[in-house]
Image (cartoon, rainbow, N blue to C red):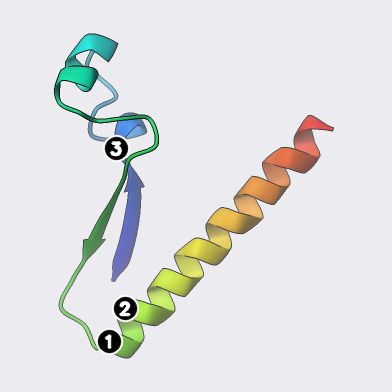
């Protein structure tokens, strides 16, 4: 399983900006967790996650216009 997480809005949502900066957790940081799977499964999950991210970004861009 390939699980990308946006650390600022998940793990670090409850800390102050100063604490987050001290921990070197930038807003652009994405944490990736991978379990024990075949290489094929990991690549497929990665591709699915990146496609979903691209679709989300396109949706947000269209929503702004």
Structural distance between the alpha carbons of marks 3 and 2: 21 Å
Q: Position of residue 57 (x, y in %)?
A: 63, 47
Structural distance between the alpha carbons of marks 3 and 1: 25 Å
Using the image, tell me which numbered label, if any, was put on residue 15.
none
Q: Position of residue 42 (x, y in %)?
A: 32, 78
Structural distance between the alpha carbons of marks 1 and 2: 5 Å
Q: Position of residue 9 (x, y in %)?
A: 36, 31
Q: Which of marks 1 and 3 precedes in the sequence?
A: 3
Using the image, tell me which numbered label, if any, was put on residue 39.
1
- Residue drawn at 70 percent across, 49 percent down: 58
Q: Position of residue 40 (x, y in %)?
A: 34, 89
Q: Secondary structure at mark 1?
A: helix
Using the image, tell me which numbered label, if any, was put on residue 42.
2
- Contact between marks 1 and 2 (CB within 8 A): the answer is yes
Is residue 26 toward the left or the right of residue 23 in the image? right
Q: Mark 3, residues whose alpha carbon is within 10 Å: few (<14), some, or many (≥20)?
A: some
- Residue drawn at 79 percent across, 41 percent down: 62
Q: In which quadrant will I find the C terminus?
A: top right
Q: Which of marks 2 and 3 precedes in the sequence?
A: 3
Is residue 56 toward the left or the right of residue 27 in the image? right
């Amino acid at each position: 399983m390939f699980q990308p997480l946006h650390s600022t809005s998940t793990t670090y949502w409850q800390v102050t900006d100063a604490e987050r900066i001290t921990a070197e957790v930038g807003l652009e940081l994405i944490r990736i967790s991978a379990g024990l799977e075949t290489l094929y499964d990991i690549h497929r999950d990665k591709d699915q996650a990146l496609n979903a991210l691209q679709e989300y970004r396109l949706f947000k861009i269209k929503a702004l216009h």
